[in-house]
Image (tube, rainbow, N blue to C red):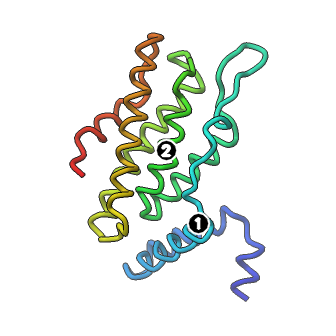
Amino acid sequence: MADTFIANAKVDDLRAITRSLLASGSPNLASAFTTAARSRLCQTNAKCPPNPSTLFAIRQNDGMVVPTSQLNEALSRARTLYGAGMGFASLGVLESVVRATIGLRWEDVSELSDILALVDADISQAIQSSKEEIDAGRIGDLASARQIVTELRVAVRDSFVDCETWGGEFPFERASGSIEFWKF
């Protein structure tokens, strides 16, 4: 019967029930939940980075750069990964997003600048998740984890240089600081 309920319940109801169950259950329940979530995410290849060329589009009527639904999907995927304790995998997704911004132009106050501020916060959250991943001993390939961090560091630095060339406001200040001061 529980499977019938799960198959037919609304997403908001499942979300509320899951939160309630995790909040009221034993600490082992939350741990088992995140373990199952990580297993599922590995099975579905959720850590696959998005195609950077599909994350942004140029609006025809005014030439403004706008986020696409693929960007929203990529950010949701990154949040799912770091929320399940797969911080390094989420950094790979977020690195693709940062890399896709290089060469774009945006207004200081715009839909895109607001989204990029969220990406900046996501990177900081993903770094925290990565630190917890290290502390929990869940890093199987330390060299690959370091490579992901290096690639993100380079993408953020390249974005900074790009913003300076056109006088734009650099959107990844917090991420830049978090990455530069992370001793990993």
Query: Disc 1 on helix, strand or loop?
Result: helix
Q: Is residue 41 above or below residue 52?
A: below
Q: Quadrant of the N terminus?
A: bottom right
| Picture disc at residue 16 | 1
- Neighbour tally class for label 2: few under 14, some 14-19, many 20 plus, Cα within 10 Å: many
Please report whichever mark, 1 or 2, sits nearer to the chain's N-terminal start.
1
Amino acid type of the residue tagged 1 in the rendering? Ala
Residue 135 x %, y % = 26, 66
- On the picture, is 22 further left or further right than 61? left
Q: Is residue 81 left or right of residue 12?
A: left
For the residue labelled by badge 2, is the local secondary structure a helix, a strand or a loop?
Answer: helix
Q: Nearer the viewer, residue 56 or 148?
A: 148
**Whether residue 129 is visible:** no
For the point 45% across and 80% down, the residue is 32
Which residue shows up at 50% across the image and 17% down it? Answer: 108
User: Which numbered circle lies on residue 175?
Assistant: none
Q: Quadrant of residue 51?
A: top right
- Estimate the x, y position of residue 140 in percent, counting from the top left: 37, 69
Residue type highlighted by circle 2: Leu
Residue visible at 66% across and 67% down in the picture? 13
Q: Is residue 32 above or below residue 153?
A: below
Q: Work out how far the residue at label 1 is from the one at label 2, CA to CA, in angstroms.
A: 27 Å
Q: Nearer the viewer, residue 111 or 105?
A: 105
Quickly name the residue at label 2: 94
